[in-house]
Structure formats: structure tokens, C-alpha cells
Image (cartoon, rainbow, N blue to C red):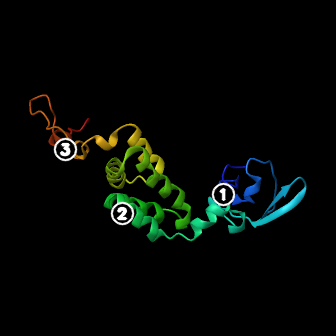
Amino acid sequence: MNIDYHVDVERHLYSVPHRLIHQTVEIRLSATTLEVFERGTRIWVHRRSQYPGYTTVPEHMPHAHRAHLEWSPSRLIRWGGTIGPHTAALVEQILASRPHPEQGYRSCLGLLRLTRQYGAERVEAASTRAVLVGARSYRHVEAMLKHGLDRVPLEDEAASPPPRADHANIRGPRYYQQELPDAD
């Protein structure tokens, strides 16, 4: 079983009671259901999904995770806004990129926790870069911070390509648009 009370079956994560973290469970699949067994006793049945994603039953969650259910996307966005406007925008984009906003909570909380290690200014700078490049996860921002990319001026990325040299050895577009003589 996974470390977060979910089992991974064909790229879909199904919850099991959190007391079974790090325990071995048996899975039985049918066309429409996924059954979870502990030592031969069926403990849960999920409707089977054919799509990647999550199926989470609140009763399977530890108490601390259930408290997250009381959270709302707007609460996380406001928290991101205390770091800076780009962090708030990134939190909003992370939540919007998931089929269910709750599936983005862990990534958002990880992003917001990065301020403990790197400080709000660096997290805001990395969030700015993440928004510009379309990164939508905590891991992307963490990698930027680890490698110091948040400290590289953004102007370097937006710089125009160097001017082309202009001399006789460079063929322009007209060269390739010339009509070739017939080979008869």
C-alpha cells in the first residue's frame, strides 16, 4: 500500500482505512468493482474507475486529513497571497489543474511550507517563474529553489535571440524560394 492510505491500481488511487498504512492488503478486481481485503476479510469495496485519479472515502482519512476537508480553495489562495500575488496565482492554478481541487491541497501545502526553508521572497520569485513557464506542482517550485533558479533574472529568459550576422555566406529565405531549372 502507498504511504498515504491509497492503493494504486492501474494509475488510479483508491483509499483504504489509514490504520493500514505500510500494511499489505489484497485487491480483487472485477469489471465494475475493486475489493480490498485484510487477511482474507473484505474491508472495503470501491466502484472501479477506468481513469487516472483518486477515489477517497473520508472515513479512511486520518483525523488531521479530515480537517483538510474543512479547508477551501479560497483559504489556500488567501494563504498564498500572504506570500505574494504570484504564489496566490500559482496556488489557484494548481487547484484548477486537478479534476477536484482537493487533489491539489497537498501540493499547495507543500508550496506554502517552502517558506520555512527558503523564505517568502524566494518562494514568491520561484512562483513567479512557475506561473510564467506553466509549472503546476510543488516539486517544480522546490527544484527551482534548490537550484537557485529563483535568483536568475527573468529578463535572461525573455531575451531575444542574438542578431544574425549579415555577410555573403548566409543564405536568406530568398535563396530557398528560387525556382530550380528543369532537369530535362
The answer to which quarter of the image holds residue 49 is bottom right
The residue carrying mark 2 is 81
Q: Which residue is pictured at 35% across the width and 55% down the height?
A: 131
Q: Position of residue 37 (x, y in %)?
A: 84, 57
Residue nearer the viewer, 5 or 68: 68
Pointer 3: what residue? Answer: 160
**Classed neighbour count for the residue bearing mark 3: other residues with Cα under 10 Å, few (<14), some (14–19), many (≥20):** few
The residue at 39%/61% (across/down) is 80
Q: Is residue 169 left or right of residue 56?
A: left
Q: Which mark is residue 12?
A: 1
The quadrant holding residue 11 is bottom right
Q: Dot 3: what SS?
A: loop
Q: Nearer the viewer, residue 116 or 22?
A: 116
Q: What label does residue 141 carry, if any? A: none
- Name the front one of labels 2 and 3: 2
Sooner in the amino-acid sequence: mark 3 or mark 1: 1
Q: Residue furthest top?
A: 169
- The answer to whether 93 is drawn above or below residue 172 in the figure is below
Q: Is residue 156 left or right of residue 36?
A: left
